[in-house]
Image (cartoon, rainbow, N blue to C red):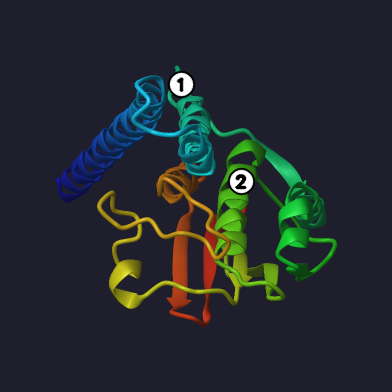
Amino acid sequence: MNDLINELQLKIDRLEHEINFKNGLISILSHDSKEIFGNFLLLIEALEQKTISEEDFFSLLPQVKSDAQKNLQTVQDSTTWLKTQYGEFKIKPVKIMMMDLFHHLEEKYAAKLKEKNIKFYFKGDPNAFLTTDRLLLEYVLDKILNNAVKYSLSGQDIYLQYFTENSENIISVVDFGTGIGEKYLSAIFNYDNPVFTGTAGEKGAGLSLKIVKNFISLMHGNIKIISSENKGTAVSIFLPKI
């Protein structure tokens, strides 16, 4: 009887989490879309009515571009998440070489790493591999690395680390950037947690980590974040060995 109650409670908790996640996602999409299109429309109307000069109009375009990029990223993240919501989504475990994953991320972020003069290193067995869903894992590490680059200063290093412990694969992205204050770290997956600007003015919607946590759950794993303000952040994901 107790086992049945515990199983039902787990299902209730999972449903509540999914409902909160979807409600938060809808809220972010609604707010960001309304904000970017509303601001852009007001700007165009001001130019048409000559309440703003052309010089001022063009001086504001970089800010509009930045907001549009943030909004586009939100839509792209949401689209990736939606792929897991149609029909009976099931993870597709495949063998993934860690060095292949590292080189994929290194190539994808080559321009951003060069722009900030950041070195990206791999720590662990170069012949190591794990078995899990490639789409979900690549998304998760992409978003974690993106944050590491965003909050790192010029000349700092970032590491992708891999090792196994007991029955788990542990993958970590470690940076030495601005870090996260303790009062914000405890609420990092909440929708009312503030969104910070990167060291080069990069913006985000604060959505990616919510989807990251959701995807890690789909892979039957867990996430742990250790961070100190002005000292850096280590984001670790724990995945079961298959």
State which tag comes first along the sequence, 2 or 1.
1
Q: Residues within 10 Å of mark 2 (few under 14, many from 20)?
A: some
Q: CA distance from mark 2 to mark 1?
A: 19 Å
Q: Which residue is mark 1?
A: 88
Residues at badges 2 and 1 in contact (C-beta under 8 Å)? no
Type of the residue with mark 2: Leu
The reply to whether residue 240 is in sight is no
Residue 106 lies in quadrant: bottom right
Q: Which residue is mark 2?
A: 137
* Label annotation for residue 215: none
Question: For numbered disc 2, what is the local secondary structure?
Answer: helix
Residue 149 lies in quadrant: bottom right
Type of the residue with mark 1: Glu
Residue 134 is situated, as x and y percent measured from the top left of the image, at: 66, 40
Tell whether 139 sits left or right of 43. Answer: right
The reply to whether residue 41 is in sight is yes
Residue 192 is situated, as x and y percent measured from the top left of the image, at: 25, 52
Residue 116 is situated, as x and y percent measured from the top left of the image, at: 70, 64
User: Where 230 sits versus 44, above or below?
Assistant: below
Q: Residues within 10 Å of mark 1 (few under 14, many from 20)?
A: few
User: Where 30 sits versus 130, above or below?
Assistant: above
Q: What residue sits 24% from the left and 40% below the top?
A: 20
Tell whether 118 sits left or right of 61. Answer: right
Q: What residue sits 52% from the left and 72% below the top?
A: 233
Question: For numbered disc 1, what is the local secondary structure?
Answer: loop
Residue 98 lies in quadrant: bottom right
